[in-house]
Structure formats: structure tokens, C-alpha cells
Image: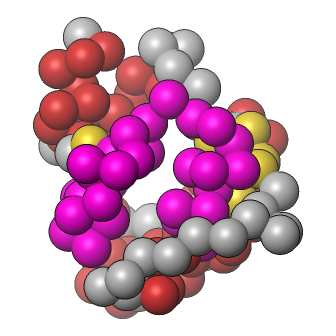
Amino acid sequence: MLPKSTPGQVIAAWRVGHFNLVLSEPMLDEIGTVLNYPKIRKRLLWNDDTIGRYLSLLRFEAEIADIQGTQAHVPRDAKDNMVLATLLASKADSLVTGDLDLLTLADTYPICTPSDFTKRIF
């Protein structure tokens, strides 16, 4: 993440213990896929080793929620079902995302943007 970006600030706040991070195995897989996109690799200047270390850090330090059997439905994008299922299975306080398909569910679930989240934690 770019350190001065809002998502970078969220990651930095997690790294110093301002909140606990919850992920699921499908989310970790998706993060790995996205970090390997050529455009992302070029922007971050990360190689295979750096990506691997970052994923290991996430796996080691985040709480990994078991989403098997958790029903979640994101009407606008079924690929986001795993993200909503992670929120539901973990009973997390909030889901932080910039994804508009998930943000449309903010009236029903505790979902907020990275910008709104940083205002709450700082």
C-alpha cells in the first residue's frame, strides 16, 4: 500500500494495534491475486518475495474467520459474498471497503469507507 494513501493509513493503524484485522482464506487468496496484477506490482514496486512476505504477515497477524456455512448475499456482485460472509462469521465491528457494491449494504451491515474508518480510529 502507498503509506500516505487512506488505505495505507488504515494498514499502518492496524500494524500499530489500533484495531484487529479479520480476513478469511478466500480474502487472502484474492489479496494475493490482486497484488500479482502487473499494474499493482509496478505501482508498489513489489516482487514475488515481497508479496509472499506480506501475505505471510497477514496470515500470521490477522484473525482468520472460517466462513464455511455462512450465508451472505451481495446483490450487485456475487464475488463479494466472501467479504460479507467474513464480516458475518467474525462478528466484526465493521467492514472497511471502497467497493461500491458492498457500500450499498451499509444501511443493513456495519460497512464504511476507509476514509470514514480513519476518522473513527484517529
In this view of the protein, which residue sits in the foreground, 23 or 53? 23
Rendering coords of residue 107 (x, y %) = 25, 48
Residue found at x 17% / y 20%: 119
Q: Going 25% across and 17% down the picture, which residue do you hit? A: 120
Q: Is residue 22 visible?
A: yes
Quarter occupied by residue 96: top left
Foreground pick, 14 / 83: 83
Task: Please report the residue visible at 24 percent of the width from the left and 11 percent of the height from the top.
Answer: 122
Residue 49 visible: no
Percent position of residue 44, x then y: 32, 63
Task: Give how far across and how far down residue 17 sits, in percent.
Answer: 54, 14
Residue 122 against residue 88 in the figure, above or below: above
Q: How many marks?
A: 0
The answer to which of 1 and 96 lies nearer the viewer is 96
Q: Quadrant of residue 48?
A: bottom right
Q: Is residue 102 magenta?
A: yes
Examine the rendered structure and indicate whether residue 37 appears above or below residue 30: below
Residue 23: within the magenta? Answer: no
Q: Which residues are magenta?
A: 82-111
Q: How is the image coloured?
A: secondary structure
Classify residue 50 by image quadrant: bottom right
- Residue 45 placement (x, y as % from top left): 35, 66
In the image, residue 87 sits, relative to residue 62, either above or below, namely: below
> Which residue is at a point 74% across and 65% down the rendered structure image?
70
In the figure, is residue 74 to the left or right of 2? right
In the shown orientation, is residue 16 left or right of residue 111? right
